[in-house]
Image: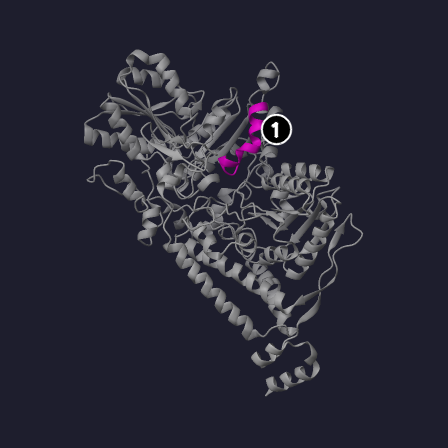
Amino acid sequence: MRKMLAAVSRVLSGVAQKPASRVLVASRNFANDATFEIKKCDLHRLEEGPPVTTVLTREDGLKYYRMMQTVRRMELKADQLYKQKIIRGFCHLCDGQLLLLLMQEACCVGLEAGINPTDHLITAYRAHGFTFTRGLSVREILAELTGRRGGCAKGKGGSMHMYAKNFYGGNGIVGAQVPLGAGIALACKYNGKDEVCLTLYGDGAANQGQIFEAYNMAALWKLPCIFICENNRYGMGTSVERAAASTDYYKRGDFIPGLRVDGMDILCVREATRFAAAYCRSGKGPILMELQTYRYHGHSMSDPGVSYRTREEIQEVRSKSDPIMLLKDRMVNSNLASVEELKEIDVEVRKEIEDAAQFATADPEPPLEELGYHIYSSDPPFEVRGANQWIKFKSIS
Amino acid sequence: MGPPLRPNQCRSRLGAPPSLPAVCGRVARNPGLQVGMAAFAATAGRLLGLRAAGTEGRLLRLRGAGLQWALLQPASATGDAAQRRQVAHFTFQPDPEPQEYGQTQKMNLFQAITSALDNSLAKDPTAGKDRVFNTPLCEQGIVGFGIGIAVTGATAIAEIQFADYIFPAFDQIVNEAAKYRYRSGDLFNCGSLTIRAPWGCVGHGALYHSQSPEAFFAHCPGIKVVVPRSPFQAKGLLLSCIEDKNPCIFFEPKILYRAAVEQVPVEPYHIPLSQAEVIQEGSDVTLVAWGTQVHVMREVASMAQEKLGVSCEVIDLKTILPWDMDTVCKSVIKTGRLLISHEAPLTGGFASEISSTVQEECFLNLEAPISRVCGYDTPFPHIFEPFYIPDKWKCYDALRKMINY
């Protein structure tokens, strides 16, 4: 009854915008878009920042929700597979465990929403979410984690070394990817195709010397590089107060303008990225973004994540700032989608992940011959010496 | 291209007789290290005292939570797939309980190291807790600071989280630490610096948690490089490194952190550096290794004795630089055959230095070419690790070919 009244009122109020198909399919009608207010960003050496309101269309909203949910489920599945010992190695998930990315989904989906597919991205080891948002399928990612042939790096890289088109990984050594990112930005400028490079690093890496070298060169040569510090408040086990003399990571670029963004709100991240990309594309040089986010689990699978912070803190952040929950609430409250619809997406995503996990477990491992491949670019193929003088592997690439 | 190989299939493929046991040992499941810290102990005559949230601190916290069992027991295999992957390529063989150093306690490798650090810090009871502290994530900075502290005369122990990450600090070590005494004509030195780093393959470390970079540092006169094989050795060698008046790099085999359990004396004691140890006497072949690989060689020696009736002399090199040429050469003169093994890649690995020196000194005593069983010339692989490492089958195979030369 209530639903019918709501439907009737909506029909009366918003008839003109609805496409005909929607009237046939849905008994409830949704708004096409909604305007949201987002948090203002702190600025460093900038007069204006990103806008404080943004428009989210229904289509985009559903897309972001699906992507975030996929990343979340994928990471949880990876966590599960790791505990079943099907995935081995040092695994860093986006939510913390396995170097997982849970709770940081807004970062990867939001960043992707703010740039073009032709732009470039490089990050550190918490890379599964970015690999997905940059275009690879969940199957390839999970197969790479389990070290199988179908994986994106043919099973040779594992968790920390995933690559895709315009996505340069996936780097294990902390901080080493930032000079690389600046180099990619140099190439962008040189090629003149109006592309930017997003170079991500964490709050722990922000204290590495090579990052400051990259800042200096990027600013000197006005490279279109967006340095992004994903500040999840802990560098493995060390809280930012104990590691950094200045925890205002967005100011650490000193002569590079910076902004501090709420990394748990995908719309905030998207607007800030659009702003930063526009800044770089206009030739003004590099810019620094600090995404304030949080990781739910520990640093990696060997870290329970509670020895350096309290469970209450984790619970609090989880209940108040979960990015998927925030987006869901927003969409439902402004009638961009219904709870049932989002649940349907959840179910679809779950199925997709299950299929991918099945593939990842069943796919065969790369053949032993490939052990020597891709060391050098070789022409003709040369031989790799093995564990003793009678073992040799061919190296082809 | 046949079906993909699993580790136990691989062993039979490389020629091991099927009657030999396929299971070589179960390792404590060590998915990763403790939350790492860089610990500095500065003793400038003003030692500062206790330990902050170091590895031991974490151990205490976990012990309180009743999880001590998880630290010292090997994890049980939960299924066939898990079992296959979990079987280590070696079995740790503890030395007999040492009698001459007083009361001993059962310790694993990281506890032995913590004990060594405790002993070292306790030397100055007036100093306080803040001697041990975390640093931000900067290896170059960590080692640079350590050198600076050591130059003023204080004792510095710097920890690099994994040996794979030591390369940002490579410049500081090679260009500053190693050359300080030489370039200042002995006016200054950073001898009271010790750098510790977890080292070597761990079963699932992939490219950046498994490297053995001792060969890079062996090329640098001025520093000492030490690799222990067991908790008892580790404590004694680490204390010697700390006392030693030269900058030392102490690589700790991370796979042994929990897997190696031994009786270790509680009181401090020193094991001399640059002295290799003959842990098993023999007459036909000399086997040289260091760190984890020593245990592999011990197994190879017993296999050789059993299957081929060959008596092997096993030597633990302990100190890579400066290395004990006399012990090794003396042994080769006796046996006439030498097999050297390490996990690091073959080309330019430390086995090449040993091989070259031995053939210079003992050419006429050699019955067969010197054999080196090492890792492949590839980056340390992720999924291919069981095939990459020089396990006992490869060593046994090489030994057999040497005997039949």
Q: Which of A19 and A38 lies nearest the eye of the viewer?
A: A19
Along the horizontal axis of the image, is A385 left or right of B144? left
Identity of the residue drawn at 72% across and 52% down: A278
Q: Main secondary structure of the magenta part?
A: helix
Q: Position of residue A392 (x, y in %)?
A: 35, 31
Asked if residue A306 shows in the view, the reply is no
Which residue carries the number 1 mark?
A: B149
Q: Which of A71 and B258 lies nearest the eye of the viewer?
A: A71
The N terminus of chain B lies in which quarter of the figure? Answer: top left
Q: Is residue A188 magenta?
A: no
In the rendered image, which quarter is residue A275 located in?
A: bottom right
Identity of the residue drawn at 32% across and 21% down: B370
Identity of the residue drawn at 43% across and 43% down: B382
Looking at the image, residue B205 lies above or below residue B238: below
Q: Which of B133 and A27 lies nearest the eye of the viewer?
A: A27
Q: Position of residue B198 (x, y in %)?
A: 47, 36
The C terminus of chain B lies in which quarter of the figure? Answer: top left
Q: What amino acid is at disc 1?
A: Ile
Along the horizontal axis of the image, is B290 left or right of B298? right
In the rendered image, which quarter is residue B319 located in?
A: top left
The magenta stretch is: B160-175
Asked if residue A357 shows in the view, the reply is yes
